[in-house]
Structure formats: structure tokens, C-alpha cells
Amino acid sequence: MESNRIFVVLNFKSMKLSNYIQGSWIEHDGEGIPQYDAIHGNLVATCGSKGLDYAAMADYARKVGNPKLRKMTFHERGRMIKALALHLHGIRKKYYPISYQTGATKGDSWVDIDGGIGTLFAYASLRRQFPNEPFYVDGDTVKLSKENTFIGHHIMVPKAGVAIHINAFNFPIWGMLEKLAVSLLAGVPAIVKPSEITSYLTEAMVRDIIASDILPQGALQLVCGKGIGILDPVQSQDIVAFTGSADTGKKLSVLKPIIDNTVAFTMEADSLNACVLGEDAVPGTAEFDLFIKEVRREMTTKAGQKCTAIRRIIVPEKLLEDVQIALGKQLSKTSIGDPQVEGVRMGALVSKNQVKEVKKRIKQLTKTSSIVYGNVEKFDVIGSTKRKGAFLSPILLRNDNPFKNQDSHNIECFGPVSTIMPYKDLGEAIELANLGKGSLVSSIVTNDTKIAKDYLMGAAPYHGRVHILNEACAAESTGHGSPMPLLTHGGPGRAGGGEEMGGIRGVKHYMQRTAIQGHPTMITAMTNQFQYGAKQTEKPVHVFRKHFEELEVGETVFTHKHTVTVSDIVNFANVSGDNFYAHVDETSLDGTIFEQRVAHGYFILSKAAGLFVDPKKGPVLLNYGLDECRFVKPVYPGTTIGVRFTVKEKVDQEKRSEEDIAKGIVKFLVDVYDQTGETVALATILTMVKKLNQA
């Protein structure tokens, strides 16, 4: 019932789309751009962006949205994204009837809708890899002076501008959410500009996002029309993320405001992605069948309107006929028509104009390649007609001489079109794959590790992702065409040279990395992470007697001391079973770095724990693990050791349920030193500490 209501609202009440500008929904001026149902040809809505004040929009985002997001910690921003994901997931079914009008099948819509919401969930979870701070401390400390009174570090803060997200027509929801998840976690507001062809689906979701009141004011604005001039007011703190054709992306990247203000610009462009069949994957093997299935799926999913779709099918020369026949049989099972009719496996292209464009490109390709499956004019349509909808048959071309006839490596048909071509050996396969001049993804289907590695090493410089498929991973493989939120989505050359998502890597794109220098005590105060050499403060109460909130970074316990004996070493060897010669056999030390038998490193660490632990029951719940450990100086019998046990960093944790104990992780620096004051071992241990406030 809810889905029908939304469908009616979209087609009648909301015929005229609105833009969400500076906190208000504003209908577009004039007649606008018509948006048609790709299946039946009916008018869905009109959109426009005429007269919008993009400078005012950008200023609003910088002055209203940006400060609110910047003040939030990564954990707060992550919880905000999680709340949004949960909200949209609960109402996601309402978007499917709208999505069908774009020509998408239920499976296509699942990738767009559920996949987009899934990306929000993925980035919400990523908050745990960031501190509960508005900033991120990047990398390791750099020692800049002999006495360690002057050090350096890197800190990353949200840029003080706005992100302009320009998205393609093929994924009206995923395209928005995969960018929005990253910029919001980074703390940067966004102006979203979906394609004017399918922005009616984006607008439907944005209305729900705004109505939820989950995002702070100014965090999101929406332009449903063409957005001409949207990049004119960009400034140095702004970021532009573009998805679309390589030609359009190149034009935008060199606009005067982009160049003059050195604006960060990332582009993810359509590319001529390749799928290679390994020489071992002959007919009768599981890998051969997987190859045919993968190519068929990538040709027909979203009617081939994917930036990651397989455009070039590269197979061993001796298997060319086998692949052509097998693929033709699979493609013949692809029923075309209305996605809401049972049995339909491929919907329509997004518009009739797109059909014309694809046909034009097919005609160009047939100058050097021949069609071996499909017909651009003769095919059946279920539940509609070719006259009404934007339908096209899957088209398989064959290029027998791909090194001479290079149109296949230069011309892209953004539809259900792909070209099969032969190779003589793996070197040729790599060369052919790389002739695409840079792509988002290439796949190799093989069960031979040498073939896979040789292909990877040869093709990796030209591809943003390499998908290696065989029977062992097939059941859980996400496939050639599916970018994953925590892996980089982008590619070199023709693919745009940019990177989207990629987990922490993508978040950093929206932040400014700044080098900071100073005394360790000052850098500790700036980062809230203890820096070696900083002031250490001893308090009357042992750190293990304090709750999470009561502990301070730099707070230190200076322990009692212990003199290591031969008996310690022998006893530890007996208990642990570690009878390495350097610990137990003094006659075997000639030619080694050791002067006499040496204490086990793990004995030193264990003894250190005996020195710094307060054994009584208290707020410390458990030892959570060991981050890093270094044994930097040999400890011989007679050496006296002590420990400087310092609160290094506090990592907040969220309660998983009302019954859960409120707690956090405290990282302690274990600095074991000898009677000369020199460090003999360094480690970072993690303890789980109960909070004073259990609310």
C-alpha cells in the first residue's frame, strides 16, 4: 500500500520536481526538462535548475552545514550515518516502483537501493577505525631532533568547504549515497547533483532524508536539473566528485574555478573494462562456466549501463568459437521487457536518446567488428513495445584482429554491448586489456595461480581493481561489476584517475593533512595521543583503580624495579618451552650479537606486567590485546628493569545494548628501562576499562 502511495505521489502530485536549497524545497522554474518512464514512455516528472543561486548554496553549506559537521566527532558522525541507514532501510521498498520506471529490474534496483543503503552501513561501521575526535592522527611520529625535544606528526581535519557531488543517470540512489557516506563521515556537507534524466528517484529519497531530521541543517542540498554553473563558485576548501563520461569529466576538471582555486577534483569515468579467460579454463571446467555466466551477467545487468560493465571479452584464440557459442546460448535466455512482469531478466535503457546513442556506437564498431549475437532492430519485448520503451537487445560483437582493429579499445557503447576478441598467449591478453588505456576493473577467470599473478603484475598499473575469479571463491564473490565500499573505486587514465570510497582512504580525500611540529608534550596535547618524550604525570591513585573517564593521557605509573637473574631465564624457558639457544646455552653464543645468555623478550614483557598491574578488582575488565611490541636492547642476568606505564590513548566504545557495560579501550605505553635509564622494550597494550557513567 505504501509503495502505491509513493507511485501516485510521484506521477501526479509531484510531477514538477523541487530542488532542496538552503533548507527549503523549491519547485523549478519554467517548463523544465521532461523525464520519461523508460518502459512505457509515459511522462514521469519535469525537473530544472534555472535561476538557482549556486554561490548562495555553497556559502550556506560552508557557513551552516560545515561548522556543525566539523564539531562532531567521527563516532558521532558515524552514528548519524547509521541512523540514516536504518531509517532508509526501513522504508526502502517504497523506492522500487519508482526505480522500475528507470528501466531497472528488481535485481538492478536492489543494487541501486539496497546497495546504496548498505554503503551507508559500511561507512557507519568504519567510525570504529577513527578516534572519538573531530580529527584524525595520520601515520607515525617523526623524530626531528637528537634529544627528542622536537618532533613532528600529521593531523587531518575536515576541509572547511562543501563537496559538490555530480552523479550519473544509471544509479540515482547508490551514486548519491556512496559519495554522501564518505563526505559526511569526513565532516563535509554536500550539494548533490544527480543526472537530470533520473533525478526523480533521487529526489524521492532526499525528501525522506530531509524529513527524517537526522542530518544537521546545511549538510545536504539537492539540484535536480542540469546544474549548469554549479562549479562556478567553488573555492580552495571545496571538493568536487564526478561520476559520468570521460569527456564530460575532462571538461569539468579544467574549468577556470577548479584550476584557479586548486580545487580537489576526483573523477570516476566510464571505461572499457575487460574480462580475460585463462588458458587453463577450458570447456568442461568450472572456471569456463563461471566466465560465461559472469560475462552474460555484466552485459545485461542494468541493460549494460554500468561504468564497470565488461566491454571487452578476451579469450584464448583456440577457445574463441567455444566462448562465442556458449555466450550466445546464455544471452538467448535473456528476456527483455517490463521489469515488473515475471520472467523478464533485462529491462530498458534509461531513455530513447540513450538507445540512439548506443546504436550509433554499435554502427561505429561494426566497421571493424561483426555482430555474432543479437539484432539492434529485431527482438521481442515482454509487457511493453519497442515503440513505447527504450529497449535494446544484448549485442555481442567479434573482433578477430584486436591489435590492428582498435575501435574496440576506444569506442564505448554504454548499453548491453560487448566485444569478444582472441589472444595467443598471456602476454597478448595483458597487452589487449591495457589497450583500454585505463579502466575501473578487469577480471581474470583462472584456477592457475601463476597465470593470475602474471596477469595481475602486468595489468595492475592500468586498472583500479583486478577481480580474480575461480570456483573456490565463486559462491561468495561479489562479481566483476560490484565496487565494494571499503575498497577503492576508480582507475587510471580513461577511467578518470580518481578514487572513491576505499574505506579510510576515501574519507581522507575530504580532509586536509597538516604537518604539526613541536615538543612531545605539546604534540600530545594537540593529538590526545601520548608522544614518547612528553611530560608524564604520576597521580596518587593507580591507573587500574580509575574508570575510563577519570584517566588522562600522559598519566604514568613508575613501577618498582626487578633485577633479572639466571634463574628467571631458566624458569621461563621451562614454563614457556622456549629453549632457544641464546637463552639456555652460553656455549653457542660465538658469532652472535649476545655477550652472555639473554633474557627472553616475552619474559621481560611478562615481568613488566607483574610490575605495573594492580591486582585488586577494579574498573579494568580485561586485557584486550597487544598493538605493538619491540625488544630494543638485550637484557642479561644482573640487569635491573623498571616500567614507565603511561596512558597513551583512550578509545571510546559504544554500548551494544541497554544491558551492555559502558566501557572504553585504553592504550597504555609499556616502556621497560634498565638501570642506565635506557629503554630495553616498548609495547602498547590495550585494556578494556569500565566507565563511571553507565547510562
Image (tube, rainbow, N blue to C red):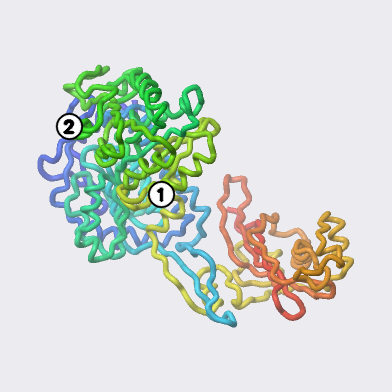
Q: Nearer the viewer, mark 1 or mark 2?
A: 2
* Residue at the disc numbered 2: 356
Q: Nearer the viewer, residue 126 or 74?
A: 126
> In this orientation, does residue 109 appear?
no
Three-letter amino acid code at disc 1? Met
Q: Nearer the viewer, residue 168 or 437?
A: 437
Looking at the image, the residue that sits furthest to the right is 567
Residue drawn at x 21%, y 38% is: 197
What is the quadrant of residue 72 in the picture?
bottom left
Residue 391 appears at what percent x and percent y?
23, 25
Quarter that holds the N terminus: top left
> In this orientation, does residue 146 appear?
yes
Residue 327 appears at what percent x and percent y?
37, 23
Q: Is residue 349 above or below residue 84?
A: above
* Residue at the disc numbered 1: 501
- Side (left or right) of 136 relative to 23: right
Looking at the image, the residue that sits furthest to the left is 30
Residue drawn at x 72%, y 59% is: 618
Residue 357 appears at what percent x and percent y?
19, 35
Residue 668 appears at what percent x and percent y?
65, 65
